[in-house]
Image (cartoon, grey):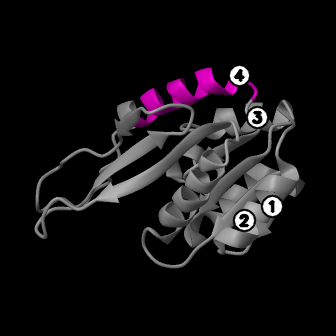
Amino acid sequence: MLGYVVSEGRGEGDRLIHAVAMQLRAAGLPLAGAVQTNEDRDPTRKCDMDLHILSGNDTVRISQDLGRLSRGCRLDPAGLERAVGIVAAALANRPALLIVNKFGKQEIDGRGFRPLIGEALAEGIPVLTAVNQGNVDAFLEFAADMAEQLPPDADAIMVWCRAHRQAA
């Protein structure tokens, strides 16, 4: 009950998971989780990264501006942990599905949404996420035999979500 998609191209996984989540939300499926959107500010700066909380209308900025010439990771760990806390509270309401924008470096290191993914699976709540190609091995090590790779296609992912959703 751990569906994941590996997509090619920068931001493709974010856009795909966001589109699926918005379709499920519009259909009235009770969700917990967060989806990422990236907003370009201007051509000389990197985009802002925001997590939209699926159980409500909160948006949490998870990027920090390190300056125009920065090359380091722009993730704001405090912003990510704030989003995780909001999603954890929503998980207590036993949603039909947990959607996590991606299983990234923070999750590989045991932080971010990783504890919530484990909690949801232990409670029988299906989880959907995206994984960058470079993180697949670490994700599969975490997921063991629970992971099911899905094609990077919104319709196919919707079919999986509907088939695996937890009864409300």
What secondary structure is marked by label 2?
Answer: helix
Q: Nearer the viewer, mark 3 or mark 1?
A: 1
Residue beneath disc 2: 157
Residue at 43 percent across and 27 percent down: it is: 82
* The one of 105 and 12 positioned closer to us in this rendering: 12
Q: Nearer the viewer, mark 2 or mark 3?
A: 2
* Rendered view: 40 above or below 93: below
Callout 2 touching callout 1 (CB < 8 Å): yes
Badge 4 amino acid: Asn
Please provide percent x and percent y for residue 66: 17, 49
Disc with the residue nearer the chain's start (4 vs 3): 4
Quadrant of the snapshot with the C terminus: top right
Marks 2/3: CA distance? 19 Å
Badge 2 amino acid: Ile
* Rendered view: 121 above or below 50: above
Residue 102 appears anywhere in the view: no
Residue beneath disc 3: 120
Q: Residue 13 colored magenta?
A: no
- Residue 93 is labelled as 4
Side (left or right) of 75 relative to 87? left
Q: Residue 82 colored magenta?
A: yes
Q: Main secondary structure of the magenta part?
A: helix
Side (left or right) of 126 relative to 139? right
Marks 4/1: CA distance? 22 Å
* Rendered view: 9 above or below 127: below
Q: Nearer the viewer, mark 4 or mark 3?
A: 4
Badge 1 amino acid: Trp
Please provide percent x and percent y for residue 128: 70, 52
Residue beneath disc 1: 160
Magenta stretch?
80-94
Please provide percent x and percent y for residue 148: 82, 63
